[in-house]
Image (tube, rainbow, N blue to C red):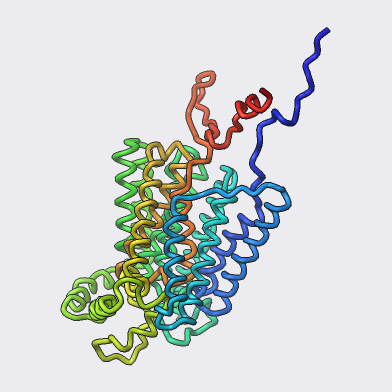
Amino acid sequence: MVTAPAPDAAIQPTRAPAPDPVVLYGVFGLLLLGPLAFGAVEPWSIFVLEAGAAVLLMIWIVRQAWSGELQILGNPLFAPMLIFALVVILQIATGRTAYRYETISTGLLYFAYGILCFLVIQVLRRTSQVRALTVAFTVYGFLMSSFALLQSLSSTTRLYWIRTPRMGGWIYGPYVNHNHYAGLMEMLVPIPLVFSLTRGARGPRKIAAGIAAALMGSTIFLSGSRGGMLAFVVQIALLAVFVVWRQRSRTITMALATFMVIGVGLIVWLGGGELAKRLASIHAETRTELSGGTRLDIDRDALKMFAQKPLSGWGLGVFPDVYPQFRSFHTNFFINEAHNDYLQLLVEMGSLGFAAMLWFLFALYRNAVKKLKNWSEDNNGAIALAAMLGVTGILVHSFVDFNLQIPANAALFYVLCVVAAMDAKFGRLRRRQVRRLDVIEEIPSPDTIPDEREGQREAT
C-alpha cells in the first residue's frame, strides 16, 4: 500500500503578508478629512495630516516587523519623488533657501504626502478594497456636493453657516476659495463616472454612480470657478476620446451622453442665470488680464525671480516671503501664492525641481496609459483612467490657480498619481458563456496568483 507523503511546508507557495486595513483606511480617512477641515490650510489641520501620516507609517512598520517579513512594493513615481526630496534637502543643507524655517516646514508637509503615497502602494492590493473605496469616495463626493449646493442656495457667507473667514473670500462648500472646491471635485468626479461606464456596474449601482457624478460635476460650474470649468471640459473630452476611440461601445457612449445631459440639466435648473453671467464675464476679464491684469503681472514677476536663482530656486514654500521685493504693481492685498503652480514650482525649486516634476508627470502618464486598452473590462485600467482623469483636471487648473498649495487637495492629487502609475495587480472582469447566460466573472491578475513552480523548485 502506497500513501502520499504529507505536504511539506517548504513546498507551499509563499504568500505576501495580508494588507493592513487599519493603515489603508487610515490613509484614505485622512484624505477625506482634509477637505472638511477647510482644505487643511490651518496649523491644527496640517498637524493632524502630518501626525496622522507618521502614526500610520509606524503602524505599518510595526506590523511588518511583527510578521517577520519586510516587503516593500515599488512605484515608477518614487524615483522622481526622491530626487525632489534631495533638492529640498540640498536647499536646507547649503543655505540656498531664502527662509530656512519655511522650507523645513513645507518640506515636512511634502514628506507627509510622500508617506501617504508610499503606504497606499504597500496596502492597496485587493479588488474588494478598490470596490469599498469607490463606494466611499462616491458617497463622500455626493454628500459634499449636496452640502455645497445647499450652502450656496442659502446665500450664506459663513463656512458651515457658522464660521466667517477672517480674510474674506468666495466660499463654496468647506473651502474659502471656490476654485479649490472645484479642484477637489475635479479629482472626485471621475471615480463614480468611470465606474458607471464599466461592466462591473449594473442596474441601480450604475444609475446611482452616474447621478452622483452628474451632481458633483454640475457643482464645478455652479461654484463659478472658470479654471474648474475649463479643467472639467478637458477631462470629459479626454474621457470621450477613450470611450469612442478605444472602446467603441455604443452602450458606454450612450451612458456618457446621458451623464452629460443630466449634468447640463442640473446646471440650468439650479443656477443657469448666475452661470450665464459668470461665463459672460470671461471675455471681458480675459482681455483685462492680457492687457496687464494682476495674474499676468505676477507671472512676469515670477519669471524675474526665477532668472536670479535658476538652478536650485529660492527655497520650497518661500514664494510669499520673497515675492514682495519683486512685485511690480501696487496692491493692498497680500500675494500669498503665484496663482500658477508651475511658475511657483519653478521659482521655489529652480530647474532641478522642475525637471523632477517633468520626470514625475512623464512616468505617470506612460505607466497609466499602458493599462487603458480594455479599461471598461479591467479593474486596473478603470482605476488608472479614473485617477489619470482626476490628475489631469488639476494639472490643467494649475495654470491659473494654486490647488497644489492647498494641503487637502495636494495630498489627494499625489495619491491619485501613484495609484494611476502603480503596477497591475487587481482582478479583471470578463464575459463568458455559461449555459447560454452572460455571466461576469472576476479573473485574478497574474500578480495575485501564487507561483506553484517556486514550491516545486524548492522541493527538488
Q: Residue furthest top?
A: 1
* In this view, 228 is above or below 94: above
- Looking at the image, is 333 positioned above or below residue 7? below
Q: Residue at x 63, y 57 (%)?
A: 23
Q: Is residue 335 left or right of residue 103?
A: left
- Name the residue rendered at 58%, 33% in the picture: 449
Q: Position of residue 425 (x, y in %)?
A: 52, 41
The image quarter containing residue 451 is: top right
Q: Nearer the viewer, residue 155 or 308?
A: 308
Spot the residue most to the right. 1
Q: Is 162 situated above or below 14?
A: below
* Residue 128 percent coordinates (x, y): 59, 44
Residue visible at 62% across and 67% down in the picture = 52
Q: In this image, 306 relative to 386: left or right?
A: left
Nearer the observer, 35 or 308: 308
Tell me the quadrant of the picture where the N terminus can be found.
Answer: top right
Give the position of the C terminus as an image quadrant. top right
Q: Residue at x 54, y 51 (%)?
A: 121
x and y percent of residue 110 in the render?
49, 68
> Is residue 148 visible in this depiction of the protein?
yes
291 vs 228, nearest the viewer: 291
208, 232: nearer the viewer:
232
Provide residue 391's location: percent of width, then percent of height: 39, 57
The answer to whether any part of residue 273 appears in the image is no
